Image (spheres, rainbow, N blue to C red):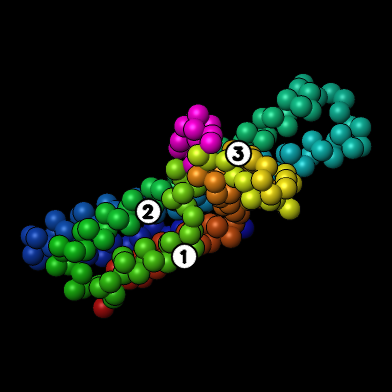
């Protein structure tokens, strides 16, 4: 099992300068919110694991014929457990959005703060932002696709995916059109926006990637 993120040690809260105290309080709020988002990401991954484990259990029961005594039909159970996976994917996407907002706020803060001279790395936040975007290159497009799913259906002509598909849950030839929403290929969440098929792994590897960014920030704001 992966470990949860460490609670940050905000060493710079008590400084002699009043300005630095104010700056430190703002920064501590940002870093603690980053910790919250990564911690929630961790919890969401357990929900995703449960979703896929329960789905696999239903399929095993169906294949073996051991369905007696269940209060709900296999179709009902698959529907509920499948929805858990969608809830998990949406939760991951929202955590990425909120974490990115924290990084944006931190970069704005660092542009005007004098406290950065005490950091182990004065450019920690721009570098953390670059690492975040390398680890999750399509996060913003995927977030827009989920947040505006109804609009994408309403404006389907602008959002159809028309390239051929040769792997995954659906195969199609070049020229045929499709919009995919709230779909999975294994543990990869799939959605469509502006003709592009967007993929995001709802896996512990993704958790490790956001934890990497968080720990980079914590190390960078440490004292020299």
Circle 2 sits in a helix, a strand or a loop, which is it? helix
Q: Distance between the residues labelled 3 and 1?
A: 26 Å
Labels 2 and 3: the sequence-earlier one: 2
Badge 1 density bin: few <14, some 14–19, many ≥20, Cα 10 Å: few
Horizontal side, residue 160 vs residue 112: left or right: right
Please tell me whether residue 8 belongs to the stretch shown in magenta: no
**Camera sees residue 39:** no
- Say if the magenta span includes residue 150: yes
- Mark 3: few/some/many CA within 10 Å (<14, 14-19, 20+): some
Tell me the tag on residue 134: 1
Residue 164 in percent (x, y) is at 68, 51
The image quarter in which residue 114 lies:
bottom left
The residue that appears at 67% across and 30% down in the rendered structure is 80
SS category of the residue bearing label 1: helix
Q: Nearer the viewer, residue 102 or 61?
A: 102
- Residue located at (79% from left, 28% from top): 74
Which of the two labelled residues, at mark 3 and mark 1, occupies the earlier sequence position?
1
- Looking at the rendering, the stretch of residues picked out in magenta corresponds to 145-157
> The C terminus appears in which quarter of the rendering?
bottom left
Q: Are marks 2 and 1 in contact (CB under 8 Å)?
A: no
Alpha carbon distance from label 2 to label 3: 27 Å
Percent x, y of residue 91: 50, 42
138 or 49, which lies in front? 138
Q: Would you name the residue on which mark 3 appears? A: 179
User: Which residue is disc 2 drawn over?
Assistant: 100
| Alpha carbon distance from label 2 to label 1 | 13 Å
Q: Which of 31 and 182 is in front in this view?
A: 182
| Marks 3 & 1, CB-CB < 8 Å contact | no
């Amino acid at each position: 099992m992966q470990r949860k993120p460490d609670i940050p040690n905000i060493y710079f809260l008590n400084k002699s300068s009043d300005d630095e105290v104010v700056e430190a309080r703002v920064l501590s709020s940002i870093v603690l919110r980053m910790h919250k988002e990564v911690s929630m990401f961790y919890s969401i991954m357990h929900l995703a694991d449960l979703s896929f484990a329960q789905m696999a259990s239903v399929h095993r029961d169906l294949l073996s014929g051991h369905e007696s005594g269940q209060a709900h039909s296999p179709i009902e159970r698959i529907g509920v457990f499948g929805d858990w996976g969608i809830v998990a994917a949406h939760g991951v996407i929202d955590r990425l959005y909120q974490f990115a907002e924290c990084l944006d706020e931190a970069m704005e803060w660092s542009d005007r703060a004098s406290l950065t001279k005490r950091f182990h790395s004065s450019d920690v936040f721009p570098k953390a932002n670059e690492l975040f975007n390398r680890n999750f290159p399509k996060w913003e497009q995927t977030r827009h696709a989920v947040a505006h799913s109804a609009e994408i259906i309403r404006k389907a002509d602008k959002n159809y995916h028309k390239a051929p598909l040769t792997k995954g849950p659906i195969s199609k030839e070049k020229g045929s059109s499709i919009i995919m929403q709230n779909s999975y290929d294994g543990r990869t969440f799939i959605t469509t926006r502006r003709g592009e098929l967007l993929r995001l792994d709802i896996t512990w590897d993704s958790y490790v990637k956001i934890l990497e960014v968080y720990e980079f920030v914590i190390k960078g704001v440490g004292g020299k």
